Amino acid sequence: MKEVVIVDSGGANLASLQYALKRLGARGEVSANVRTITAADRVLLPGVGAAAQAMRRLHLAGLLGVLRALTQPVLGVCLGMQLLFERSEEGETDCLGVLPYTIRGLSPAPGRPVPHMGWNTLHGIKPDPLLDGVADGDFAYFVHSYAAQVTPHTLASAQYGAALSAIVRRDNFWGTQFHPERSAATGAQVLQNFLRL
């Protein structure tokens, strides 16, 4: 099985991502080491918490330029997906800039609290190797207060008031706003596809 490095971005979902990979027969090494990350066959960029904190941690580890320059498959998960964008309204934070556009805060409404937390369906699935075996209407598990609008880079959306990007791609960079490690069969399929890229 090819080597997967999980970037140590300080998030609380590192162990659950490792466990999800282990269930698929892969080993995920958690690291903030530049050489380890650049040598990996695949890189997972997780994130839980605030964009500014995560970007500060990546900056202090000397990883900003390293992550932007990766040429192997990279998958950003939840906040990790948001960090791939140019900017986040959360703390007016400059992010990695792999994808254009700004991450914006979700608007609460009656029956639609923020954070968006729980199961939601994926829609508008575009053909992509990451989404082999994932169908329109499949469920995934979300926990987030900020989101990317639907753009030409969106592979699948979810509805929470307005449509938001649930899965994105630009070149060798993919992102899921949901947590694949907590999304049962759908998440396992996405992670399995990532291991096959």
Image: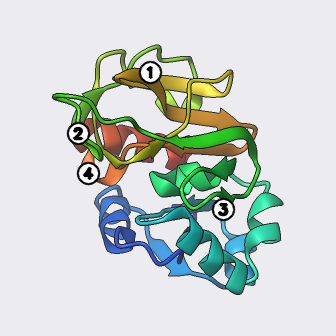
Amino acid type for the residue under numbered disc 3? Asp
Check disc 2 and report its element: helix, strand or loop: loop
Which residue occupies the foreground of this view, 193 or 60?
60
- Whether residue 153 sits left or right of residue 150 in the image: it is right
Whichever of labels 1 and 4 marks the residue nearer the N terminus, that label is 1
The answer to whether residue 35 of the structure is visible from this angle is yes
Identify the residue position indicated by label 3 in the image.
41
The reply to whether callout 2 and callout 1 are in contact (CB within 8 Å) is no
* Residue at 48% from the left image edge and 24% from the top image edge: 156
- Whether residue 45 sits left or right of residue 94 in the image: it is left
Front disc: 3 or 2:
2
Check disc 1 and report its element: helix, strand or loop: strand
The answer to whether residue 197 of the structure is visible from this angle is no
Identify the residue position indicated by label 4 in the image.
182
Amino acid type for the residue under numbered disc 2? Pro
Whichever of labels 3 and 4 marks the residue nearer the N terminus, that label is 3
Marks 4/2: CA distance? Answer: 20 Å
Label annotation for residue 113: 2
Whichever of labels 3 and 1 marks the residue nearer the N terminus, that label is 3
* Residue at 60% from the left image edge and 80% from the top image edge: 57
- Whether residue 22 sits left or right of residue 163 in the image: it is left
Amino acid type for the residue under numbered disc 4? Arg
Q: Quadrant of the C terminus?
A: top right
Q: Measured from the top left, where is residue 115 in percent x and y? A: 29, 47
Front disc: 1 or 4:
1
Identify the residue position indicated by label 1 in the image.
163
Q: Which residue lies furthest to the left in this view?
A: 111
Whichever of labels 2 and 1 marks the residue nearer the N terminus, that label is 2
Which residue occupies the foreground of this view, 194 or 108?
108
The reply to whether callout 3 and callout 1 are in contact (CB within 8 Å) is no
Front disc: 2 or 1:
2
Q: Measured from the top left, where is residue 98 in percent x and y? A: 76, 48
